Amino acid sequence: FRNISKNLRETAVAAHQSGEGYKTISSQPELHHCTVRKIIHKWKTFKSALSVVGSEVTKNVRIVQIFKHFYI
């Protein structure tokens, strides 16, 4: 998962929100469709497409799991 600019990640998320599929999104900025899928999955999980490193990742995963427990 190479370093992808913040602008490119936000563009992919915006395109997904408008209803475009992974392959359609990936053809425009020349990203692999699996990379687009990872960006969208991270956005759905953390509500952010930015890279989260180290202990913040485990902290955010725990918070998401707690909220899912209470709201499902």
Image (spheres, grey):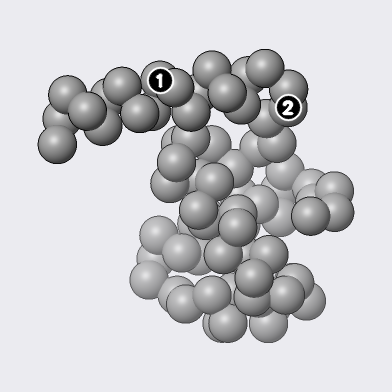
Calculate the distance from the C-alpha at mark 2 to the C-alpha at mark 1: 15 Å
Measured along the vertical axis of the image, is residue 3 above or below residue 17? above
Mark 2 sits on what residue? Answer: 53
In the foreground, 33 or 70: 70
Dot 2: element: loop
Measured along the vertical axis of the image, is residue 50 above or below residue 70? below
Dot 1: element: helix
Q: Residue at x 31, y 22 (%)?
A: 66
Q: Residue at x 15, y 30 (%)?
A: 71
Label at residue 43 = none
Q: Residues within 10 Å of mark 2 (few under 14, many from 20)?
A: few
Q: Give how far across and how far down residue 11 sits, in percent.
A: 61, 57
Does residue 30 appear left or right of residue 21 in this picture?
A: right
Q: Are marks 2 and 1 in contact (CB under 8 Å)?
A: no
In the foreground, 7 or 71: 71
Does residue 58 appear left or right of residue 2 in this picture?
A: left
Image quadrant for the C terminus? Answer: top left
Q: Earlier in the sequence, mark 2 or mark 1?
A: 2
Q: Give how far across and how far down residue 51 sits, in percent.
A: 70, 36
Q: Picture quarter containing residue 20?
A: bottom left
Three-letter amino acid code at disc 1? Ile
In the foreground, 43 or 70: 70
Image quadrant for the N terminus? Answer: bottom right
Q: Residue at x 64, y 70 (%)?
A: 34
Three-letter amino acid code at disc 2? Val
Mark 1 sits on what residue? Answer: 63
Q: Residues within 10 Å of mark 1 (few under 14, many from 20)?
A: few
Q: Give how far across and how far down residue 9 sits, in percent.
A: 66, 52
Measured along the vertical axis of the image, is residue 11 above or below residue 6? below
